[in-house]
Image (spheres, rainbow, N blue to C red):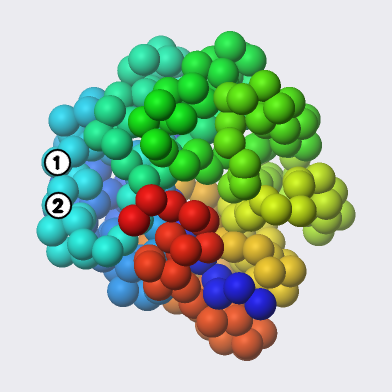
Amino acid sequence: MEKLIITAAISGAEVTKEHNPAVPYTVEECVREAGSAIEAGASIIHLHVRKDDGTPTQDKDRFKTVMDAIHAQYPDVIIQPSTGGAVGMTNDERLQPTELNPEMATLDCGTLNFGGDEIFENTENTIKYFGQKMIERGIKPELEVFDKSMIDMALRLGKKGYIKSPMHFDFVMGVNGGISGTLRDFNFMRGSIPADATYTVAGIGRFEFPLAAAAIIDGGHVRVGFEDNTMISRGVVAESNGQLVAKVVRLANEFGREIATPAEAREILGLKA
Ligand code: KMH
Ligand code: ZN
């Protein structure tokens, strides 16, 4: 079986220090949290950035500062900026980090309710626009799909030339407004992607580790991190992103799945080196 790629979503845009005091806002905190995850076995950092007060931002300069600071200490790691940003941002605001020509970036494949009164909006034209920009800039999209219909959208837009194959999906499961985090729905998602596609699974909250185990067994890949879940076990706040990654490594060891280095992750995902 292919080695396991672990992605650490260290910060997100919604989670705060009230949920977990280790949620990173400053550049130094981002380096600390990315470092803990990389040292535990993550080969990809899925990155959102904040202002020092915790406000989410897609500012290109802030991304550059944080990415350079992480790469200064961990030159091999793959950094995957978010183009989802936070609810309510404009398309061009969200796309700013792609101007830095990262190897990967997320591409969200549909609109969904996002708790309370929030709607995370990704119209068909938005997805086309983001897909086109990523092709122009040589960026491999991680196709964030929060529901089965978003896989169908990605496949349709792939046929029209907005997304290249082989595709790499991220099944985000358990968001209130998206598909549930049950094994039944995991099987549905997993069975709905093309044979040449790869996937990672990001289980939200209590779904994080059960879905990680499912993907480890199935030959898929895993995303964990404070963006998706801040607890190491029921009622126990995680000390760091690295602690979440270490738990995935232990599960992988139990099932005999080796962990991919960044170089091996590049090979598996077909990234430009
Ligand atoms: N913060 C969410 C509204 C992504 O990174 O591409 C969107 C999100 C998805 O986190
Ligand atoms: Zn994200």
Residue 91 picture quarter: top left
Is any atom of residue 107 visible in this view? yes
Residue 263, image x and y in percent? 38, 67
- Residue, disc 2: 69
Bin the neighbour count of mark 1 within 10 Å (Cα to Cα): few under 14, some 14-19, many 20 and up. few
Residue 199 picture quarter: bottom right
Q: Tag 1's secondary structure?
A: helix
Residue 160 picture quarter: top right
User: At 55% from the left edge and 74% from the top edge, which residue is drawn?
Assistant: 3
In the image shown, does 33 or 217 lie closer to the viewer?
217
Residue 62, image x and y in percent? 18, 34
- Residue, disc 1: 65
In the image shown, does 269 or 227 lie closer to the viewer?
269
CB atoms at circles 2 and 1 under 8 Å apart? yes
User: At 52% from the left edge and 26% from the top edge, which residue is drawn?
Assistant: 131
- Which residue type does callout 1 highlight? Thr
Q: Tag 2's secondary structure?
A: helix
* Numbered circle sitting on residue 142: none
